[in-house]
Image: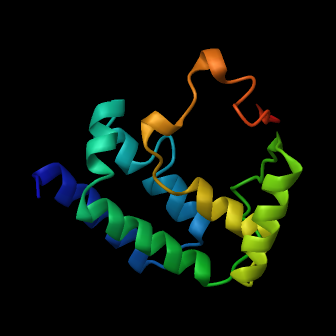
Amino acid sequence: MSTKERHVYQAADSLYRQKPDWATFFRKTLGVDGIVRKAFPSVAALAAFEKTEEYMAIQQMLVKLRSAGQTLPPPDEVEQVITIRLPKSMHAALKDEAHGFKTSMNKLCISKLLRIIDQELIPTDGSLAKTEEGAEVVEAE
Protein backbone atom coordinates (compact mmCIF):
# COMPACT_ATOMS: atom_id res chain seq x y z
CA MET A 1 0.00 0.00 0.00
CA SER A 2 1.41 3.38 -1.01
CA THR A 3 1.38 6.40 1.25
CA LYS A 4 -1.16 8.09 -1.03
CA GLU A 5 -3.49 5.06 -0.98
CA ARG A 6 -3.21 4.86 2.81
CA HIS A 7 -3.92 8.61 3.17
CA VAL A 8 -7.02 8.39 0.95
CA TYR A 9 -8.33 5.34 2.82
CA GLN A 10 -7.74 6.96 6.23
CA ALA A 11 -9.54 10.15 5.15
CA ALA A 12 -12.49 8.11 3.86
CA ASP A 13 -12.56 6.01 7.03
CA SER A 14 -12.51 9.13 9.21
CA LEU A 15 -15.47 10.55 7.28
CA TYR A 16 -17.29 7.19 7.40
CA ARG A 17 -16.97 7.06 11.21
CA GLN A 18 -18.88 10.36 11.36
CA LYS A 19 -21.86 8.46 9.87
CA PRO A 20 -22.70 10.87 7.04
CA ASP A 21 -25.50 10.17 4.59
CA TRP A 22 -24.31 8.16 1.59
CA ALA A 23 -24.56 11.06 -0.88
CA THR A 24 -22.28 13.25 1.25
CA PHE A 25 -19.81 10.38 1.67
CA PHE A 26 -19.81 9.80 -2.09
CA ARG A 27 -19.35 13.49 -2.89
CA LYS A 28 -16.46 13.90 -0.44
CA THR A 29 -14.68 10.66 -1.31
CA LEU A 30 -15.51 9.59 -4.87
CA GLY A 31 -17.12 12.71 -6.32
CA VAL A 32 -15.51 15.04 -8.84
CA ASP A 33 -13.91 17.13 -6.08
CA GLY A 34 -13.53 14.23 -3.64
CA ILE A 35 -10.37 12.98 -2.02
CA VAL A 36 -9.96 10.07 -4.44
CA ARG A 37 -10.10 12.24 -7.58
CA LYS A 38 -7.77 14.82 -6.01
CA ALA A 39 -5.23 12.14 -5.10
CA PHE A 40 -5.54 10.28 -8.41
CA PRO A 41 -6.42 12.93 -11.02
CA SER A 42 -5.46 11.06 -14.18
CA VAL A 43 -7.59 8.33 -15.74
CA ALA A 44 -4.69 5.88 -15.45
CA ALA A 45 -3.98 6.69 -11.78
CA LEU A 46 -7.68 6.43 -10.89
CA ALA A 47 -8.01 3.12 -12.75
CA ALA A 48 -5.00 1.75 -10.86
CA PHE A 49 -6.43 2.90 -7.51
CA GLU A 50 -9.78 1.27 -8.33
CA LYS A 51 -7.98 -2.10 -8.30
CA THR A 52 -6.71 -1.71 -4.74
CA GLU A 53 -8.04 -3.12 -1.48
CA GLU A 54 -8.36 0.46 -0.18
CA TYR A 55 -10.75 1.38 -2.98
CA MET A 56 -12.82 -1.74 -2.39
CA ALA A 57 -12.98 -0.89 1.33
CA ILE A 58 -14.24 2.61 0.45
CA GLN A 59 -16.87 1.02 -1.80
CA GLN A 60 -17.97 -1.20 1.11
CA MET A 61 -18.31 1.87 3.34
CA LEU A 62 -20.54 3.42 0.68
CA VAL A 63 -22.67 0.26 0.49
CA LYS A 64 -23.12 0.25 4.27
CA LEU A 65 -24.16 3.89 4.29
CA ARG A 66 -26.62 3.29 1.45
CA SER A 67 -28.05 0.36 3.40
CA ALA A 68 -28.75 2.66 6.35
CA GLY A 69 -31.91 3.62 4.49
CA GLN A 70 -31.77 7.40 4.21
CA THR A 71 -33.69 8.11 1.01
CA LEU A 72 -33.85 11.91 0.94
CA PRO A 73 -30.73 13.79 -0.08
CA PRO A 74 -29.22 16.17 2.46
CA PRO A 75 -30.13 19.85 2.02
CA ASP A 76 -26.79 20.64 0.36
CA GLU A 77 -27.14 17.81 -2.19
CA VAL A 78 -29.68 18.55 -4.90
CA GLU A 79 -30.98 15.51 -6.76
CA GLN A 80 -30.44 15.43 -10.50
CA VAL A 81 -32.29 13.34 -13.06
CA ILE A 82 -30.89 11.48 -16.02
CA THR A 83 -32.99 9.96 -18.74
CA ILE A 84 -31.81 7.04 -20.79
CA ARG A 85 -33.49 5.30 -23.66
CA LEU A 86 -32.95 1.57 -23.73
CA PRO A 87 -34.52 -1.43 -25.40
CA LYS A 88 -37.70 -2.78 -23.83
CA SER A 89 -35.92 -6.08 -23.18
CA MET A 90 -33.20 -4.33 -21.16
CA HIS A 91 -35.83 -2.43 -19.14
CA ALA A 92 -37.64 -5.70 -18.44
CA ALA A 93 -34.37 -7.34 -17.37
CA LEU A 94 -33.59 -4.46 -14.97
CA LYS A 95 -37.11 -4.61 -13.54
CA ASP A 96 -36.79 -8.37 -13.02
CA GLU A 97 -33.35 -8.00 -11.46
CA ALA A 98 -34.60 -5.29 -9.06
CA HIS A 99 -37.51 -7.52 -8.08
CA GLY A 100 -35.10 -10.40 -7.45
CA PHE A 101 -33.02 -8.20 -5.14
CA LYS A 102 -36.20 -6.88 -3.45
CA THR A 103 -35.22 -3.30 -4.26
CA SER A 104 -36.33 -0.49 -6.53
CA MET A 105 -35.07 -0.04 -10.05
CA ASN A 106 -33.66 3.33 -8.96
CA LYS A 107 -31.56 1.76 -6.17
CA LEU A 108 -30.43 -1.03 -8.50
CA CYS A 109 -29.39 1.46 -11.19
CA ILE A 110 -27.50 3.60 -8.68
CA SER A 111 -25.68 0.48 -7.49
CA LYS A 112 -24.78 -0.35 -11.07
CA LEU A 113 -23.58 3.21 -11.69
CA LEU A 114 -21.28 2.98 -8.66
CA ARG A 115 -19.56 -0.14 -10.00
CA ILE A 116 -16.15 -0.07 -11.64
CA ILE A 117 -16.45 -0.45 -15.40
CA ASP A 118 -13.61 -1.65 -17.57
CA GLN A 119 -12.74 1.12 -20.01
CA GLU A 120 -13.03 -1.33 -22.90
CA LEU A 121 -16.76 -1.69 -22.14
CA ILE A 122 -17.47 2.03 -22.61
CA PRO A 123 -18.27 3.19 -26.16
CA THR A 124 -16.07 5.98 -27.49
CA ASP A 125 -17.50 9.30 -28.66
CA GLY A 126 -17.88 7.97 -32.20
CA SER A 127 -20.34 5.33 -31.03
CA LEU A 128 -21.91 7.24 -28.14
CA ALA A 129 -25.11 8.25 -29.92
CA LYS A 130 -26.18 4.69 -30.70
CA THR A 131 -24.96 1.47 -29.13
CA GLU A 132 -25.10 -1.92 -30.83
CA GLU A 133 -28.42 -2.60 -29.13
CA GLY A 134 -29.85 0.66 -30.46
CA ALA A 135 -30.02 2.32 -27.04
CA GLU A 136 -29.18 6.00 -26.91
CA VAL A 137 -27.74 7.71 -23.87
CA VAL A 138 -29.03 11.17 -22.99
CA GLU A 139 -28.21 13.18 -19.88
CA ALA A 140 -30.64 15.71 -18.49
CA GLU A 141 -29.10 18.68 -16.72
Q: Nearer the viewer, residue 139 or 122?
A: 122
Please tell me in which quadrant of the rendered image residue 99 appears: bottom right
Q: Is residue 139 left or right of residue 52?
A: right
Q: In the image as oriented, which residue stretches furthest toward the right?
A: 88
- In this rendering, the answer to whether 89 lies above or below 120 is below
Q: In the image as oriented, which residue stretches furthest toward the left?
A: 2
Kindly identify the residue that appears in the image at 68 percent across and 81 percent down.
101
Q: How is the image coloured?
A: rainbow
Q: Picture coordinates of residue 106 (x, y %)?
A: 77, 64
Kindly identify the residue that appears in the image at 67 percent across and 24 percent down.
128
Location of the C terminus (image quadrant): top right
Q: Picture coordinates of residue 49 (x, y %)?
A: 27, 49
- In this rendering, the answer to whether 48 lies above or below 12 is above
Q: Nearer the viewer, residue 46 or 101?
A: 101
- In this rendering, the answer to whether 37 lies above or below 6 is above
Kindly identify the residue that appears in the image at 80 percent across and 44 percent down.
82
**Res. 112 in view:** yes
- Mark count: 0
Q: Is residue 111 left or right of residue 106?
A: left
Kindly identify the residue that appears in the image at 26 percent across and 44 percent down.
48
Q: Picture coordinates of residue 31 (x, y %)?
A: 51, 48
Location of the N terminus (image quadrant): bottom left
**Res. 138 in view:** no
Q: Picture coordinates of residue 94 (x, y %)?
A: 76, 63
